[in-house]
Amino acid sequence: MKILLDTHILIWLHRNDEQLSQKAKEIILNPQNEVFYSAISI
């Protein structure tokens, strides 16, 4: 699956924020998925 992350998700993932659900973390960190983010987000 291809996943495009927005700024909030990147920050939450980096900070291990509770606002990011366990299911979302599993999907994002699954090596079978391709994760993308916009350069404008950084």
Image (spheres, rainbow, N blue to C red):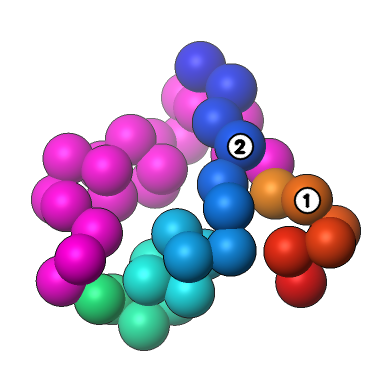
Name the amino acid type tagged 2: Leu
Residue 36 figure quarter: top right
Looking at the rendering, the stretch of residues picked out in magenta corresponds to: 18-36
CA gap, disc 2 and disc 1: 8 Å
Q: Quadrant of residue 35?
A: top right
Q: Is residue 14 left or right of residue 40?
A: left
Which residue does the image show at 47% across and 24% down from the upper left?
32
Check whether the beta carbons of the residues at disc 2 and disc 1 lie within 8 A of each other.
yes
Please determine whether, in this image, residue 38 is positioned above or below residue 32: below
Question: In the image, what residue type sits under mark 1?
Answer: Ser
Which residue appears at 85% of the width and 58% of the height? 39
Give the residue displayed 27% in from the left and 43% down from the top. Answer: 24
User: Does 39 appear in magenta?
Assistant: no
Q: Residue at x 55, y 31 (%)?
A: 3
Please rate how many residues cluster around mark 2, counting C-alpha atoms within 10 Å: few if below 14, some from 14 to 19, many from 20.
Answer: few
Q: Residues within 10 Å of mark 1 (few under 14, many from 20)?
A: few
Q: Is 24 located above or below residue 7 in the figure?
A: above
User: Which residue has dot 2 on it?
Assistant: 4
Residue at disc 2, secondary structure: strand
Residue assigned mark 1? 38
Say left or right for 11 vs 27: right
From what the image shows, is residue 38 above or below residue 23? Answer: below
> In the picture, which quadrant includes the C terminus?
bottom right
- Residue 8 percent coordinates (x, y): 48, 65
Extreme residue toward the top, this view: 1
